[in-house]
Amino acid sequence: MEIGIDSFIATMGGEGGNAAQKMSEFLLRVEHADQVGLDVFGVGEHHRQEFLDSAPTMVLAAAAARTRKIRLTSAVTVLSAVDPVRAFQAFATLD
């Protein structure tokens, strides 16, 4: 059995702060999930102003640089917003 979580990166809620702070907080959550031994962490793709995860491969690349064991994955990929082959290539390159 594998245990994991997924998340969007909302700019609203929590302690407030700007987009850079929210992204930093998100990356800290991914690091913490890795440190406590979760198996997987997924990030969703969202194309609205109040979310920071419109480019999940970039977010996952930043998380990969800070983690050691946890498997990072897409929780949502909006194929209508991108060429499916390019989405595959981006995630394959990240992997």
Image (cartoon, rainbow, N blue to C red):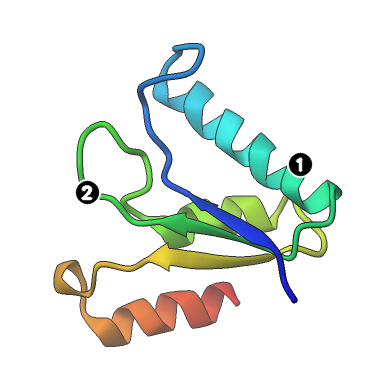
Q: Nearer the viewer, residue 39 or 56?
A: 39
| Residue 40 falls left or right of residue 7 | right
Q: Label 1, on which residue?
A: 32
Please tell me whether residue 51 is drawn above or below residue 21 in the rendered image.
below
Mark carried by residue 47: 2
Question: Would you call the spot at circle 2 few (<14 residues within 10 Å), some (14-19), or many (20 or more)?
Answer: few
Residue in view at x 72 percent, y 72 percent: 2
Residue that extends furthest to the left in the rendered view of this protein: 80
Mark 2 residue type: His
Q: Are marks 2 and 1 in contact (CB under 8 Å)?
A: no
Question: Would you call the spot at circle 1 few (<14 residues within 10 Å), some (14-19), or many (20 or more)?
Answer: few
Q: Quadrant of residue 11?
A: top left
Mark 1 residue type: His
Residue 39 image position (x, y, % from top left): 74, 65
Residue 36 image position (x, y, % from top left): 84, 48
Q: Earlier in the sequence, mark 2 or mark 1?
A: 1
Q: Nearer the viewer, residue 38 or 57?
A: 38
Q: Assign a secondary structure to mark 2.
A: loop
Q: Assign a secondary structure to mark 1.
A: helix
Q: Quadrant of residue 83?
A: bottom left
Residue 26 image position (x, y, % from top left): 57, 37
Residue in view at x 15 percent, y 72 percent: 80
Please tell me whether residue 5 is drawn above or below residue 88 in the rendered image.
above
